[in-house]
Image (spheres, rainbow, N blue to C red):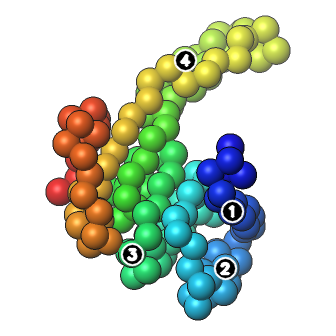
Amino acid sequence: MARELALEISWRPTRSLQEVQDLLSALEDKPPDALVVLPDAVMMDSRKHVAEFAVRHRIPSVSGWSTFAHSGGLFTYGPRLSESFRRLADYVVRILQGAKPTDLPVERPAVFELVINSTTAKRIGLTIPPSLLARADEVIE
């Protein structure tokens, strides 16, 4: 799809906070048009730095966990973590009651949320369509 849209996608994995800082420094001279931040432990620890970089360069930044939008990212769409943690607790109870982990079904997240940071949108010069704002589970002002 990227080729059809004439988009160049570059994946830059990072394994530490220092690698994130090095990556952002390397992108300073020629920042991307947008950032998609995969929600892992390293990126969540770096979320404020990544969001600040994106705002400074006036580019949209998106991720899959609402924590990113609450830290200054433009928006997030992904599983509602509180619901995932509740489901995890159910698995722990079942295992503690004697269920074999291999007998438990694999579950996909069932509850997703869209969180939009309208303050960030304004800072980078974007207008979020009212129809999208109406669909959001949360709008950060």
**What residue is rendered at 62% in x and 51% in y?**
5
Name the kind of residue labelled 4 in the image.
Asp
Camera-nearest label, 3 or 1:
1
Give the residue pinned by disc 1.
8
**What residue is rendered at 63% in x and 12% in y?**
94
Compared across the picture, whether 61 is left or right of 25 comes to left
**Sequence-earlier tag: 4 or 3:** 3
**Sequence-earlier tag: 2 or 3:** 2
Which part of the image, by quadrant, shows the N terminus? top right
CA gap, disc 4 and disc 1: 42 Å
**Sequence-earlier tag: 3 or 1:** 1
**What residue is rendered at 52% in x and 69% in y?**
33
> Badge 2: how crowded within 10 Å, few (<14), some, or many (20+)?
some
User: Which secondary structure lies at badge 4?
Assistant: helix
Above-or-below relation of 131 to 55: above
Q: Decide which of 83, 78 is in the foreground and name it.
A: 78
CA gap, disc 4 and disc 2: 39 Å
Which part of the image, by quadrant, shows the C terminus? bottom left
Give the residue pinned by disc 4.
90
Camera-nearest label, 2 or 3:
3
Q: Quadrant of residue 74?
A: bottom left
User: Which secondary structure lies at badge 1?
Assistant: loop
Give the residue pinned by disc 2.
23
Q: Decide which of 14, 129 is in the foreground and name it.
A: 129
Name the kind of residue labelled 2 in the image.
Leu
**Callouts 2 and 3 close, C-beta under 8 Å:** no
Q: Decide which of 19, 7 is in the foreground and name it.
A: 7
Name the kind of residue labelled 3 in the image.
Arg
> Badge 3: how crowded within 10 Å, few (<14), some, or many (20+)?
some
CA gap, disc 3 and disc 1: 19 Å
